[in-house]
Image (spheres, grey):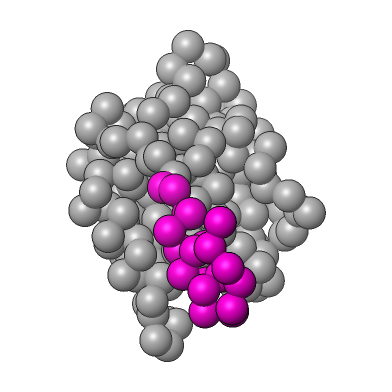
Amino acid sequence: MEDDKGDSKRLVFVTVGTTSFDALVEAVMSPDVKDELLKRGYTHLLIQMGRGIYSPTKCDGTDGSLVVDYFTFSSSIADYIRSASLVISHAGSGSIFETLKLGKPLIVVVNEDLMDNHQCELAEELEERKHLYCARPHTLHQALKKMELESLVRYTPGDGTPVARIIDRFLGFPDD
């Protein structure tokens, strides 16, 4: 897993996707979480807060604290993920797999307010395979404390050919 330890700027990028997930933003802004990030050498916290109503407090870091900034939406978050040393994300499959494909350490925070939470199953399965860490807003601080980035296993996308063949047969297309 890439962790960019050599850079003086170590960015934590937080994304909630296109919905609102104020509980995640509030958890990231808690003093315990910010202190743990600082202890681990992170210097910047950039939050993509979506449609949320909770506005984090920006900070320029001059007092030795994390530099904190936020925005609502971006047409693409890939560049933010690429520049991050750690990503903290909602449990949307697009955000999860985009982060894993870029080889970035990831903590997925499950939104417990969602009905029929299939995202939780995905995050927990990927955590079991040691590709990421999984947390809830109220357990994010504990997840950061136990986090050992060197224990994460790089995610390798699988071969989609067998699934594509099944779909093709279902649609009536001949096998190659």
The answer to whether residue 52 shows anywhere in this view is no
- Please give left or right for residue 93 compared with residue 18 in the image: left
Q: Position of residue 36 (x, y in %)?
A: 34, 38
Is 145 above or below relative to 52? above
Q: Nearer the viewer, residue 85 or 70?
A: 85
Q: Position of residue 143 (x, y in %)?
A: 27, 49
Q: How many marks?
A: 0
Snapshot quadrant of residue 35: top left
Residue occupying the point 43% across, 25% down: 3
Q: Nearer the viewer, residue 33 or 19?
A: 19
Position of the N terminus by quadrant: top left
In magenta, the rendered stretch is 158-176
Q: State the residue lying farthest toward the top.
A: 6
Is 79 above or below relative to 21? above
Q: Is residue 81 magenta?
A: no
Q: Nearer the viewer, residue 43 or 135?
A: 135
